[in-house]
Image: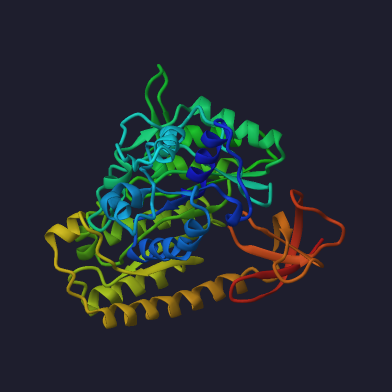
Amino acid sequence: MNVADSEVVASILSGSGYETTEKIEDAGLILINTCSIRDNAEQRIWGRLKAIKHLKKENSGLKIGVIGCMAERLKEQLLDTEKLVDIVAGPDAYRQLPLLVEEAESGHKAVNVLLSREETYADISPVRMDKNGVSSFVSIMRGCNNMCAYCVVPYVRGAERSRNPESVLREVNELYSMGYREVTLLGQNVDSYKWKETGNPVGFPGLLSKVAAIDKGLRVRFSTSHPKDISDELLHTMAEHSNICKHIHLPAQSGSSRILKLMNRDYTREWYMDRVEAVKRIIPDCALSTDMIAGFCTETDEDHKESLSLMEWVGFDFAYMFRYSERPGTKAARKYKDDVPEEIKASRLNEMIALQNRLSARSKKNDIGRVHEVLIEGFSKRSDDNLAGRTSQNKVVVFPAAGHIKGEYVNVIIERSTSATLIGNII
């Protein structure tokens, strides 16, 4: 989401005469796009601000801004930080950035963190900042209505609002004409996408189908799905289109129904398992990834074991796992005590990571001997003799270059695997 937002910001500022630079020392304006979903993300931003402090001493005209979720949540603290931050702009204030920069240049602190019920930046063509020129992100909605107890997103990004589907299709068509061969449709909860301002309402399965129909040579991904909303209609849409990637990121967060209720996730362990069974029935070759939280308020050893058993039962291909960190202003911060000791959180997280490492290794081992269509993204990290790309299931594959280039599709037979990568040869 932050990558997509940064591209919108670059587009807005380029329209006012600004250009991006690869060297931070050459910049006259530095904007740090931020996330508040976890405390460690915010701590990294504080560290980044300290790291660039010397640049302001060396260039008295340099303006530094903090934008995004952290800007909305911590505007006062940011402005008081050693007089380092000149501009604070929330996620719905990016159109105002040229004016905010002018205000900062006149010697005033420039702040706009107002949330909007309408802003989607649908009319802005983002400046693509990715390096490979093959895959890109397209934001289809903003905000979130779910109000999960641990999550700060609804407070810093506001309520859900969906983009006009025609604007989404226009942006994807532009990307395809520029040579991009993969798009990822983004939303805090893409399943709840709904455009109602015409006589024919469009839901997410309908939008996904329209994007996939642009060209068979365009791969389509999406993130993130909410377990309470993922429908059989969406799964059948994925199954019907060969160019919709067979991978679903389906955050479970916990395997305990008691904890899920405290988290306000609006589903149970049994509901989640039913949705996974539907995925495996309708899209047998679909990969599943997840998010898991260790040590949420009141979590017991038994709750933790239920999380581990759910991970084992699903057999996730990969996962993002975190220790619970209390976010100020959330329901959990207001209503519950953060009562799981940090050392127990760490121990439980380590157990999750160890289990997922085994599951990921098993998943990759099962690919040995199979042939996958791979979209080449560029050279591998270790050698220009090898290329790297991803399967439809979002697994990284490395293989000899053999004269091929990025943006091509190739069929690769998998011969071996590491903990993170499939290795094979083009056939």
Relative vertical location of residue 182 with respect to residue 56 in this rendering, above or below: above
Q: State the image coordinates of residue 94 (x, y, percent, origin top left).
A: 43, 37
Q: Give the left or right position of residue 177, taking residue 78 as reference.
A: right
Residue 178 seen = yes
Instruction: Kindly indicate the quadrant of the structure image that contains residue 305.
Output: bottom left
Front in this rendered view, residue 339 or 99: 99
**Count the marks: how many?**
0
Q: State the image coordinates of residue 226 (x, y, percent, origin top left).
A: 36, 50
Instruction: Kindly indicate the quadrant of the structure image that contains residue 250.
Output: bottom left
The residue lying furthest to the right in this view is 403
For the point 33% across and 64% down, the residue is 39
For the point 53% across and 72% down, the residue is 360
Q: Give the left or right position of residue 400, taking residue 264 as reference.
A: right
Q: State the image coordinates of residue 374 (x, y, percent, origin top left).
A: 70, 56
Q: State the image coordinates of residue 7 (x, y, percent, origin top left).
A: 54, 42
For the point 51% across and 66% down, the residue is 317
Instruction: Kindly indicate the quadrant of the structure image that contains residue 339.
Output: bottom left
For the point 39% across and 55% down, the residue is 84
Front in this rendered view, residue 366 or 250: 250
Colour mode of the rendering: rainbow
Relative vertical location of residue 229 with respect to residue 256 in this rendering, above or below: above
Quadrant of the drawing holding the C terminus: bottom right
Residue 213 seen = no
Front in this rendered view, residue 81 or 424: 81
